[in-house]
Amino acid sequence: MDIESMIQKHFTCSKCRGTHCHTKEVAMTGTGLSKLFDIQHNHYLFVSCTNCGYVEVYNPDVLSGKKAGQLGSVMDILFG
């Protein structure tokens, strides 16, 4: 089971106690050269409550214990 499915299965909003959410993976550039060359190596999961709209941000690298999105970073370098 992937991380997004696990979050959706066990989600409880910390603000309204709603149990339904929407997840979206977002990639962002860092600072320095990665910003200059638009290399998006920072990946995060934005989890929003469908009841009240409250958003929590998670680092999938920490949740899975490994570096996520490495193929995407390579593709960003090659095809910008």
Image: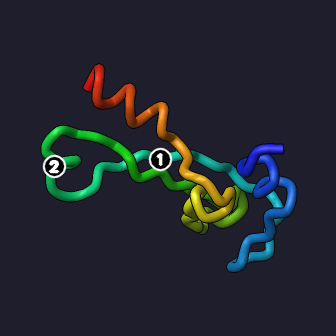
Compared across the picture, whether 76 is left or right of 56 comes to left
Q: Residue at x 48, y 39 (%)?
A: 70
Compared across the picture, whether 14 is left or right of 54 comes to right
Residue 32 lies, in percent from the top left, at: 15, 56
Q: Work out which quarter of the rendered image holds the C terminus and state it.
A: top left
Residue 14 lies, in percent from the top left, at: 71, 78
Q: Which residue is mark 2?
A: 33
Residue 20 picture quarter: bottom right
Q: Which residue is mark 1?
A: 26
Q: How many marks?
A: 2
Residue 26 lies, in percent from the top left, at: 47, 47
* Amino acid type for the residue under numbered disc 2: Leu
Position of residue 79 relative to residue 31, above or below, is above
Q: Residue at x 81, y 54 (%)?
A: 6
Residue 57 picture quarter: bottom right
Q: Are marks 2 and 1 in contact (CB under 8 Å)?
A: no
Please indicate, yes or no, whether residue 26 appears anywhere in the rendered image.
yes
Position of residue 37 relative to residue 61, above or below, is above
In the structure shown, which secondary structural element does the residue marked by tag 2 occupy?
A: helix
Residues packed near mark 1 inside 10 Å, few (<14), some (14 to 19) or many (20 plus): few
* Amino acid type for the residue under numbered disc 1: Val
Position of residue 62 relative to residue 1, above or below, is below
Compared across the picture, whether 48 is left or right of 37 comes to right
Residue 35 lies, in percent from the top left, at: 19, 48
Residues packed near mark 2 inside 10 Å, few (<14), some (14 to 19) or many (20 plus): few
In the structure shown, which secondary structural element does the residue marked by tag 1 occupy?
A: strand
